[in-house]
Image (spheres, rainbow, N blue to C red):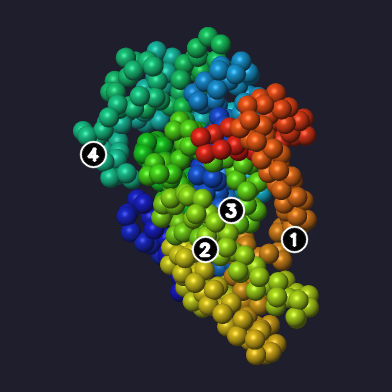
Amino acid sequence: MTLRLYDTATRSEREFSPVEPGKASLYLCGATVQAPPHIGHIRSGVSFDILVRWLKASGYQTTVCRNVTDIDDKILQVAASEGSQWWAVAQRNERAFSRAYDTLGCLPPDVEPRATGHIPEMITLMRRLLASGHAYASGGDVYFDVASWPAYGALSGQRLEHMRPAEDTDTAEAKRDPRDFALWKGAKPGEPAWETPWGAGRPGWHLECSAMSTKYLGSTFDIHGGGLDLVFPHHENELAQSRSVGDGFAQYWVHNGLVGLAGEKMSKSLGNSLLVDAVVTEVRPVELRYYLVQAQIRSPIEYSPAALDEAVASYRRIEGFVTRATELLGDTEDPPTDRDAMPPAFAAALDNNLAVPQALAVVHETIRDGNNALASGDTAALGTALTQVRAMLGLLGLDPLSEKWRAASADDDLLGVVRALVTVALDQRQAARDRKDYDAADSIRDRLYAAGVLIEDTPDGPRWTIKR
């Protein structure tokens, strides 16, 4: 069976046929680094990590490019509110994203370019757009003329006459059409700026991805990935500005579902984000990864503590089998990583648009067979089941005996001790508050802070994180 992916552009599942046989190129929209990542942000990372692992297991030589948007209106707003430099905000949060990807076991991309490092490529693309009549300079800005590209709206399934204004600048009067989007924003006092033939300024959000993806993957590449919330306007605009100058650009558009909370998309503006750094003080990183990958890639995830607890319990059952089987059989070699070493039903599930729920069903079925072998003393059958289970878990980035999670186990044990001690301290703090001894409560908070533990009081009770 051949890998089939749901392509947003055609609204259908298509057989994966790469531009260059035996190779697979993937561009993933990464972080806009105005804040540290919540679990909604990081779902994209773990979802596409599964795709990359499966492409590798299927014999493809992969090239993965994941960008960092390190200049943006939101970054400037955060810097202004903090009284910080914009680059300091960007660097701090870029490090937080890198830490989160690594904490959850995501393979690093082959290249992770920053927007600010690719201004020359953006200037070149704007020259091409202006020369072809698809862009125009106005008032220090440069805009894409959406009416010049008849296919505009095809990716998201919208008609131009029904679209709202772009609302991406506060200089809309400079636009020919309010739906035109900014490629380049003219310089403003106090903001960072780079020189171009059309004046100093900074890039628009959409321009950077077209410039960076084609620099590293070529004018035509295989897969463009990102969250469903990026289909419009971000990916629609990328597609228009790249195709209008003759680039083949992405051949498949693959989007992951979002993580919601109480029926709403998780976002900083809603104040309902669950930061990765905080969640991994409550559950182990591998358990959070299991929670985020267990759904089909396009399906939404509705977060609740109960759902997370259920995922933790499910992973621990898997881990328990691996532990018991290994104790009986002794240390075993690491399992093979190619698809042929995995049960056909598992491979078929992943070939079917990364149907991870069905793939996990095969894992659990194999574990049942292994438990039966364990009960009957059939060590040969147990060894086969253990090898298959570990191979499947390795593909999903969940093998508890992998180097990644073995190394983390000692840290997990230490974190468990820290968690218990912090819980005791928080109970004592709450008792002090209940008896209105606020000096004692504040003293406990301050001592925890001095020890490196940050306390945030929320409507659902205190939340703690470790200072980074």
- Name the residue carrying label 2: 21
Q: Earlier in the sequence, mark 2 or mark 3?
A: 2
Q: Position of residue 173 (x, y in %)?
A: 32, 14
Q: Are marks 2 and 3 in contact (CB under 8 Å)?
A: no
Kindly state the secondary structure of the residue where label 4 is placed: loop
Q: Which numbered marker is on residue 406?
A: 1
Report how far apart the C-alphas of labels 3 and 1 lie in the structure.
16 Å
- Residue occupying the point 31% across, 31% down: 146
- Name the residue carrying label 3: 288
- Residue occupying the point 33% across, 59% down: 12
Q: Position of residue 250 (x, y in %)?
A: 44, 48
Q: Is residue 317 visible?
A: yes
Residue type of the residue flagged with mark 1: Arg
* Image height of 451 relative to 301, above or below: above
Q: Earlier in the sequence, mark 3 or mark 4?
A: 4
Label 1, residues with CA under 10 Å away: few <14, some 14-19, many ≥20: few
Q: Is residue 334 left or right of residue 253?
A: right
